[in-house]
């Protein structure tokens, strides 16, 4: 088998390994550990120092008592180690993947005093190294800073997932892993900044460093600089303490499919260069401190399916035109709590692929365009917590289909036409238009409908009702407030 061909096969196997964590070991050696014939057969040829390095490397993770040579005398042959894969190079077998962590019953698991052994870096053909739930908080351990250059020609995947005790900085020396395609550092306890040296990883396809409680500093401007990272498909730096503004260099990540920078402390405006990411399907910038309005260039990002900008003080208003450019792909639009003012443009009804629309908790004013109900895929629409006014002009079928996934409560000037929909399907927390002048007198079933649900857009709407103490008397105050504050606006438009 040619080494290059082997590389490609192993890449596929490495991908499998991420899912199966260790099943690949048997795939590669062809199985047969249980069969007596295999056990009696010749061992897979291997350099003795390679075999010794493998035992030593694993022993330092799984604990002193682990007798590798006794348990697995032929680790690349008839006695495979769960989580270890091998491949053939010039007639000799080499370990190419090591995955440690409690995935399967017989997976390699870290000892309470697991540590990195220097012999790990003697496994010169190692392509995949993965640690899941290996370093608990009781075993604080740093990622080694030295020796990564020894794996620079081979290592393609490096993963640390769910290691609360993995502390310290991301070593700048990881930038020497020039063959690296996937760097995943999820839910650890890493500190410090994301090293600019990661910009030297020109083969990266996936960079994920989310959920590290103390990861801070800015997003390095080396990412995407000079279009050097055309192969990067996924950039996820969410759930950290990253500060500063989004570097315009990110617009150079031309092949990017998903960008998730949510749950950080990023500020400044969204750079127009991001509009050059023509293959981007997910842009998630939720829960930051970004300003500068909803950038109009997002409408020209032809592949965008999920645009999530909620919980940012963006301000400004919704673009009044151009939404039809996103009609075929955009499925999720989350603009909850971004300080929007002005009206909801009728042209948003052109978003024919939209399934989820959240405009809640803004300062939107004016009427709700009736065309929104004609978006064929729409399954959830949150307009609550605004200053929308006038009569909701949707048909009964729309309210019936949407149920609690249509939210328009907390808009004091909004009402619905009692002739358009029966009480059971009336929009929750919205008053009947005629009530603005002449409040209905009966409580009964109406009372149920007027309770204000607590749901917020970013979550799936809860069916629970908020105001458990609603009573006949309590129903009157919103009607009175409405009639005294906005009756004049409504009189002309609603009560005709
Ligand atoms: C490991 O196993 C081998 C073979 O069973 C045995 O000879 C050796 O003494 C064992 N080593 C330890 C440290 O137990
Ligand atoms: C994470 O790191 C911080 C700062 O180094 C430390 O205070 C904290 O105890 C660590 N948490 C865990 C679970 O190890
Ligand atoms: C964008 O996606 C298309 C279709 O998958 C692909 O042919 C093209 O190479 C991608 N662009 C970049 C810059 O990777
Ligand atoms: C927003 O991000 C901060 C900082 O990462 C985090 O502490 C907070 O829980 C997040 N809030 C929400 C609503 O996700
Ligand atoms: C609605 O408008 C009133 C009067 O202009 C204002 O006081 C209030 O803050 C607005 N509410 C929202 C949610 O924007």
Image: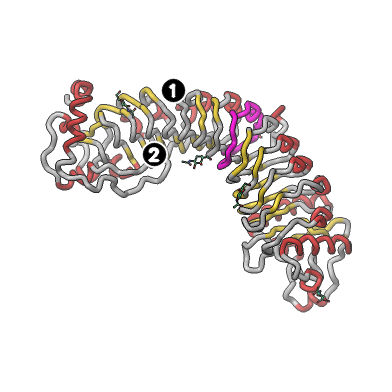
State the SS at label 1.
Answer: loop
Q: Within 8 Å of ligand 5, the CB of disc 1?
A: no
> Is 479 one of the magenta-colored residues?
no
Indicate the quadrant containing the N terminus: top left, top right, bottom left or bottom right. bottom right
Question: Which numbered disc flags the more N-terminal residue, 2 or 1?
Answer: 1
Answer with the quarter of the image where residue 363 lies.
top left
Above-or-below relation of 267 to 140: above
Count neighbours of disc 2 (C-alpha within 10 A) and say few if under 14, some if 14 to 19, many if 20 or more.
Answer: many
- Residue under pointer 2: 378
Magenta span: 238-260
> Is 258 one of the magenta-colored residues?
yes
Above-or-below relation of 471 to 137: above
**Distance of mark 2 from mark 1, alpha carbons?**
25 Å
Q: Quadrant of ligand 1?
A: bottom right
Indicate the quadrant containing the C terminus: top left, top right, bottom left or bottom right. top left
Position of residue 65 in the picture relative to residue 344 (left or right): right
State the SS at label 2.
Answer: loop
Above-or-below relation of 373 to 213: above
């Amino acid at each position: 088998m040619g080494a290059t061909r082997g590389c490609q096969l192993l890449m596929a196997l490495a991908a499998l390994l991420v899912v199966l964590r260790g099943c690949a070991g048997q795939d590669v050696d062809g199985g047969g550990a249980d069969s007596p014939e295999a056990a009696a057969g010749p061992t897979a040829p291997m350099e003795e120092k390679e075999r010794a390095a493998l035992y030593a490397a694993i022993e330092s993770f799984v604990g002193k008592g682990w007798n590798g040579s006794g348990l697995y005398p032929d680790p690349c042959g008839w006695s495979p180690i769960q989580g270890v894969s091998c491949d053939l190079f010039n007639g000799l077998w080499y370990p190419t993947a090591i995955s440690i962590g409690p995935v399967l019953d017989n997976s390699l698991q870290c000892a309470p005093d697991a540590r990195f052994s220097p012999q790990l870096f003697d496994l010169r053909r190692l392509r995949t190294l993965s640690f899941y739930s290996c370093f608990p908080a009781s075993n604080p351990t740093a990622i080694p800073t030295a020796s990564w250059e020894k794996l620079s020609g081979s290592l393609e995947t490096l993963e640390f997932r769910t290691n609360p005790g993995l502390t310290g900085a991301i070593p700048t020396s990881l930038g020497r892993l020039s063959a690296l395609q996937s760097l995943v550092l999820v839910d650890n306890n890493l500190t410090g900044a994301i090293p600019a040296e990661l910009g030297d990883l020109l083969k990266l396809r996936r960079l994920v460093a989310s959920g590290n409680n103390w990861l801070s500093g800015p997003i390095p401007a080396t990412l995407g600089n000079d279009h050097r990272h055309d192969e990067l498909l996924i950039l996820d730096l969410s759930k950290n303490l990253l500060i500063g503004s989004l570097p315009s260099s990110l617009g150079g990540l031309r092949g990017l499919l998903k960008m998730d920078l949510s749950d950080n402390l990023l500020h400044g405006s969204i750079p127009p260069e991001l509009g050059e990411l023509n293959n981007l399907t997910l842009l998630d910038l939720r829960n930051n401190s970004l300003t500068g309005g909803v950038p109009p260039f997002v409408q020209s990002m032809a592949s965008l399916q999920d645009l999530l900008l909620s919980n940012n003080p963006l301000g400004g208003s919704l673009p009044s035109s151009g939404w039809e450019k996103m009609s075929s792909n955009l499925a999720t639009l989350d603009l909850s709590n971004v300080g929007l003012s002005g009206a909801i443009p009728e042209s948003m009804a052109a978003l024919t692929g939209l399934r989820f629309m959240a405009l809640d908790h803004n300062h939107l004013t004016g009427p709700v365009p009736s065309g929104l109900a004609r978006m064929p895929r729409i399954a959830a629409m949150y307009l609550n917590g605004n200053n929308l006014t006038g009569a909701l002009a949707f048909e009964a079928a729309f309210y019936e289909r949407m149920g609690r996934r249509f939210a328009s409560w907390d808009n004091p000037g909004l009402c619905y036409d009692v002739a358009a929909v029966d009480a059971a399907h009336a929009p929750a927390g919205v008053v009947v238009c005629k009530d603005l002048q002449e409040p209905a007198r009966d409580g009964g079933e109406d009372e149920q409908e007027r309770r204000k649900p607590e749901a917020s857009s970013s979550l799936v709407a809860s069916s629970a009702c908020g105001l458990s103490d609603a009573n006949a008397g309590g129903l009157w105050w919103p009607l009175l407030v409405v009639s005294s504050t906005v009756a004049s606006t409504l009189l002309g438009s609603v009560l005709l």
